[in-house]
Image (spheres, helix red, strand yellow):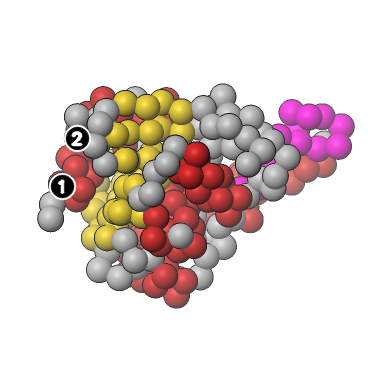
Amino acid sequence: MDIKHHFIEKGQGEPLILLHGNGENCDYFAGQVDLFAQYYHVYALDTRGHGKTPRGNAPFTIRQFADDLLGFMDAKGIEKAHLLGFSDGGNIVMVFAMKYPERVRRLILNGANLDAKGIKRSVQCPIEIGYWFAKLFANKSEEAKLHAEMLGLMVHDPNVKPEELMKIQARTLVIAGTKDMVKDEHTRQIASHIPDAQLVILDGDHFVANKCPDAFNRAVLTFLRNE
């Protein structure tokens, strides 16, 4: 692998890997790491080109990030892990669970989406406009190039068909906020296409884990610790 992930590690027990959203880093999970580490061996990663993890030379795509996660797990000797992903992080672990089902214990998808059509237009339109403007200047500015790559994740990825979700074998929890930027019907579509998935809608917006950690953490731990 052409990169080495920056990550926070805490706790003991079964591995629980946390993946943040677009343009963020592992600090997003400040309200989760300490609590989850009381029960699990927590790893909160900076994904490729985010936070303190280098960009590297590989493609800047959700599927590449899923393969990066596999490389991280192999390097750490983690055979199977619980995976929790937020937003683009949710898309990464969703793709990972479809491609490498044998490596996933339980799966939590928070604010994930199958494609750009799943995002409310009031949010998606500015993203697409920003992406095309950044692309215009990508050859003239390294900053614009990186910005275009980042926004491109939300324009082109992950492009998963609902029926592909049947490949997920892990017990799955789908979480979103009542005022999420992901359309409610889209979140419900994801949950309905994953075998036996649980769906929890919490009072809040897309960033419910960060803004309402008590309710979010309670839902996640109930799911993970319930036999």
Magenta-tinted stretch: 138-154
Q: Is residue 32 visible?
A: no
Quick one: 13 or 85, which is closer to the camera?
Answer: 13
Locate residue 14: give its quadrant.
top left
Sort mark 2 into few (<14), some (14-19) or many (20+) by Cα contacts within 10 Å.
some
**Which residue is under mark 2?**
39
Q: Secondary structure at mark 1?
A: helix
Labelled pair 2, 1 in contact (Cβ < 8 Å): yes
Left or right, 180 with respect to 46, comes to left
Is 148 colored magenta in this rendering?
Answer: yes
How many marks the image carries: the answer is 2
- What type is the residue that disc 1 sits on? Arg
Q: Main SS type for the magenta part?
A: helix
Task: Give the answer, above or below, for where 14 lies relative to 42.
Answer: below
Cα gap from disc 2 to disc 1, whole angstroms: 9 Å
Q: Is residue 184 above or below residue 41?
A: below
Residue 107: image location, x then y, percent: 33, 53
Confirm whether residue 61 shows in the render: yes
Which residue occupies the extreme right position in the image?
Answer: 140
Give residue 181's position: percent from left, percent from top. Answer: 43, 48
Is residue 28 positioned above or below 114 on the image?
above
Specify whether residue 206 is painted magenta.
no
* Disc marking residue 225: 1
Give coordinates of residue 125: x percent, y percent.
60, 50
Q: Residue furthest left?
A: 227
Q: Residue furthest front?
A: 77
Depth check: give the residue in front, 7 or 20. 7
Quarter placement of the C terminus: bottom left
Residue at image location 24% in from the left, 37% down from the top: 13
Residue 36 location (% of width, % of height):
24, 33
Q: Looking at the image, which residue sits at the far bottom? A: 163
